[in-house]
Amino acid sequence: MHNSANKTLPPVAFTQQAYPGVGTSIVAELETGSISLLAITTATIAMACKKCTHQTVIAATHNIGTTRAPCSKCGRLLEIEFYPEYVYPGKKKMGTLVTRNGRCVDIPEMTVQVTCAKCVPGENTSASSMQMAGVRPGEHRLGKCPTCYTELSLRIRKTLFVVELASEKKKKPVDKVKLSPGEPLPETGTCKHYKKSYRWLRFRCCGRLFPCDICHEEEINGPDGDRHVPEMAARMVCGFCSREQNVGETCLCGKGTTKGKQNPFWEGGKGVRNTVALSKKDSKKYKGAGRQKTEKH
Ligand SMILES: [Zn+2]
Ligand SMILES: [Zn+2]
Ligand SMILES: [Zn+2]
Ligand SMILES: [Zn+2]
Ligand SMILES: [Zn+2]
């Protein structure tokens, strides 16, 4: 009926990369015989498009960063990152999926690498491992250890997706202000902290645009902030023409983007961070002139 049934493959180098954040966990109920360790190396995932709800099947492999495929109905690009984990008797979580533009609804099939429990665990576990391809939930699969020929058995009774609730935290950064190249930025790119810095900076830590490092920190440490560790900016958007480019003192349009004092660390320089003294002076002088709200709704 199915060609892939009972197909076995040689083992592959598998490095566990447990996902540090929150995503959708794959949890399984397993029955194993003579297997000490297993891991999903490829998962065929049915993903429902967020836009049209149509389901598209995507094969996500363990060592590939992001797998992308268009929704087979509306064409929207669906993305999956797959972080499988080693599973041993008593452990149910098999890995984490991080998706964009859709959600996981089923794993109809997977390739599972299994390691023999009868062979002495040593440096060369690949000699006592194999991959079972085309493993479908509910089916009973058998294989033989390539070293000691013990029969290895596996049945994945069922799989469940457990969506971890804080998954919103990991969402991609979006610019809340739309850039119109050719047009100036609001306030020509200045802010209440730096009245003579005519640009916005794109911070490496979060990929978002802010007029300055203080605006950035106010946002990330504010009520909706995630308190991430700030990193300096490598890109800027000119306040006069809204073109994004590498950080520099002069824009491609010929206008100077900084005048007078600047903050060398955060604006792409190498120096020490030394913004507080400057900003206090400026913010007193121009109290109430702030527009850090442009990064909010
Ligand atoms: Zn769609
Ligand atoms: Zn063995
Ligand atoms: Zn940031
Ligand atoms: Zn600012
Ligand atoms: Zn410019």
Image: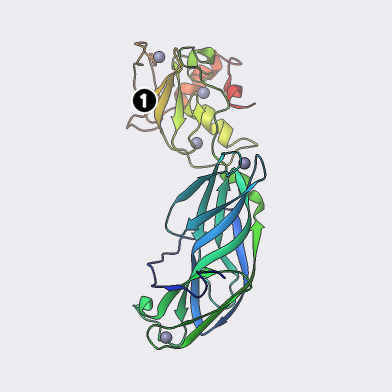
Secondary structure beneath label 1:
loop
Q: Quadrant of ligand 1?
A: top right
Taking 54 as reference, is 91 above or below it? below
Report crowding for label 1: few under 14, some 14 to 19, many 20 or more residues within 10 A (C-alpha): many
Front in this rendered view, residue 240 or 215: 240
Q: Does residue 27 appear to the left or right of 113 in the view shown?
A: right
Name the quadrant containing residue 218.
top right
The location of residue 27, given as percent across then percent down, is 62, 65
Taking 214 as reference, is 107 above or below it? below
What sort of colour scheme is used for the picture?
A: rainbow
Front in this rendered view, residue 294 or 150: 150
Camera sees residue 19:
no
Asked if disc 1 is less than 8 Å from ligand 5, the answer is no
Please give the count of numbered marks on the rendered protein: 1
Q: Quadrant of the N terminus?
A: bottom right
Q: Quadrant of the C terminus?
A: top right
Q: Which residue is mark 1?
A: 247
Taking 198 as reference, is 205 above or below it? below
Residue drawn at 32 percent across, 32 percent down: 270
Q: Does residue 152 appear to the left or right of 167 in the view shown?
A: left
Front in this rendered view, residue 279 or 89: 89
| View extreme (left): residue | 270
Say what amino acid the circle numbered 1 marks: Val
Residue drawn at 39 percent across, 72 percent down: 11
The location of residue 159, given as percent across then percent down, is 63, 66
